[in-house]
Amino acid sequence: MLVDANFCMNLALKEAWKYQGFTYPNPAVGCTIVSQNGELLAVDAHKKAGEAHAEVNALQSAYFKITDDNTILSLKKSIDIHNYLLSHHNNIFHNVILYTTLEPCSHQGKTPSCASLISELGIKEVYVGSYDTNEKAQNGNQILIESGSIIYKEQMLQACDALLSPFKMFLNHRFVFFKWAQRLNGTIDDGIISSSASRKHVHGMRNVCDLLVIGGNTVRADRPTLDARLVNGKAPDILILSREKDFDKTIPLFNVKGREVFIESGFSKLEDYKNIMIEGTSTMYELSKEYVDLYLCYLAPSFAGSKIFDVKNDTFEILNIQKESQDIIMWMKREV
Amino acid sequence: MLVDANFCMNLALKEAWKYQGFTYPNPAVGCTIVSQNGELLAVDAHKKAGEAHAEVNALQSAYFKITDDNTILSLKKSIDIHNYLLSHHNNIFHNVILYTTLEPCSHQGKTPSCASLISELGIKEVYVGSYDTNEKAQNGNQILIESGSIIYKEQMLQACDALLSPFKMFLNHRFVFFKWAQRLNGTIDDGIISSSASRKHVHGMRNVCDLLVIGGNTVRADRPTLDARLVNGKAPDILILSREKDFDKTIPLFNVKGREVFIESGFSKLEDYKNIMIEGTSTMYELSKEYVDLYLCYLAPSFAGSKIFDVKNDTFEILNIQKESQDIIMWMKREV
């Protein structure tokens, strides 16, 4: 297998997908840095809003690889890594090649933009996957071109666009994903389905969602809490989809602090939110189809139970698969 | 993410799993080569018996990366790559680090052993995952140690052992795997399930299997050919598991040249073969359980049909997942 531009961009893509969703309201972005010969120096991703961008994380690792100066590894804040790189780079990055799934940002905020950082470090070759449509951040490519870098645009554009699609959706309007967990034989009953790692992943997703939609029957049957306690996160607001408005208010989800709970018979509440998770059975799957952008399936490699996640006819494009402890996590797009 | 020893070994593992099964009667092996700083030079695998070992494929790529001499890329035969490396290496490999999922072979056949090649190239650091139990090939580590290399043994041993497990099984006795294709909702009816890429993968597996086991009812209902025509490969012998011995001999599988077909009510024929694929429904799954070493599932990301692959209770350990075109290919071990 050739360690070529696609190989390097693919490493960046795989790393970025691990943090898909968690970076909200920022995009999931991955970055690979290689030496002039295509030798790998770093693969990293943006992990959480407020933390360093993918390029900064990757430059931090690459700096350590090249210099063996581990001071930089102790720096956690993006601005500290930026400043350390700018004052210590000593032109070591002149011949590296940087791959990023998204045009480097041009937004000068608390830290200089990634585009400025890359140009000040003198990186001459940058492979860029997709484009930034956020007005504040775009024009990163232009900054790099003006500083004399060569930009190879649209490297694996389609795959980088797929990675970026949730971001573009909540930027333009909102992002809605449907989440379910099932076993290999399609079942959703008979006790806990997913591994504890998968359940922690779900709580991580809830922590960044504004709104969680769930069906009234599920609430009555499961009496869930639907918070993000496994990651010490914040609980999203809840929309219970139900014609019947009367619920037992001792059901735990009604008693989570700082949360609003709406009980409505339709989806109009979605208009007030940007990042929305729908959890549910196949009934909810069918009801919510027209609102859902992507599907997130947690697949446990086991046979048990008897109640199937009973969707009749649909085909998906798999955007990413990843093994999380003993389960498979799949991001998919429904083919229409 | 740190580009460390586990990262490098993991690249080798992922690459090797792509060829799991296809390398029979050789083991699936992967190899990564990095520069002294841990910068990536090559990731490759053994792909097919008779072709170059993983280490030779990776050294070929690494040589090209370092020297830019593309003559070596035109060489296909292992002996030619060996000879070219030995006469042209010019000590460029002294400081590289080599990761291999399996102890390099010590078997001097048509080519010098991989262990000899690595030591003659002067590679000083070698990370080895698992051990070779093939008497002809073992002692590679010893050759390297005697030539002054440092061996880091048992790097990701458990994962390397899992990759190697089919090889150890057919070396010691035989390897039996059960293959099925299903959709996300567990169904196996309603027409073609898998993508053409997955079906080609199945034919590739048939091409290297000695024996294919299938149920009598499936033969009667599907009237299959069960050959390897999609890869221009050889068709395996067939064991039809059936109490009723009378079959319509115009069913295509009976008319494939060079194949033996057995119709028996038990599995005793398995004793005569080394690499055995069982294809079938959940009935065959239950019948064959005690004989099966690993499970190979082709999962299509779609909902359709109604007949479930109806296994009641089992849990698997996923050894590897890989996306093949639009499907997921999973190698799994049943937990007992």
Image (spheres, coloured by chain):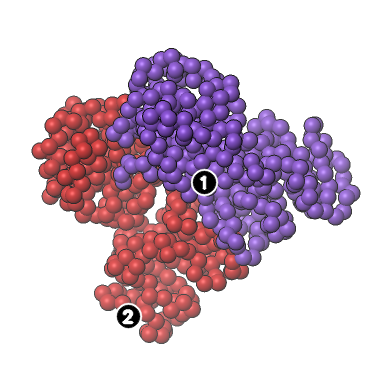
Chain colours: A purple, B red
Based on the displayed image, in which of its 4 quarters is residue B227 positioned? bottom left
Q: Which residue is mark 2?
A: B255
As drawn, the label of residue A5 is none
Pointer 2 and pointer 1: residues touching (CB < 8 Å)?
no
At numbered mark 2, what does the secondary structure look like: helix, strand or loop?
helix
Q: Which residue is mark 1?
A: A161
Q: Is residue B284 above or below residue B114?
A: below
Amino acid type for the residue under numbered disc 1: Asp
Q: Is residue B52 above or below residue B265?
A: above
Q: In the image, residue B293 lies at what x, y percent? A: 41, 55
At numbered mark 1, what does the secondary structure look like: helix, strand or loop?
helix
Q: In the image, residue A22 lies at what x, y percent? A: 60, 36
Q: Nearer the viewer, residue A84 or A333?
A: A84
Q: Which subunit holds the residue at mark 2?
A: B
Q: Outermost residue, right direction?
A: A246
Give how far apart the Cα atoms at labels 2 and 1 are.
49 Å
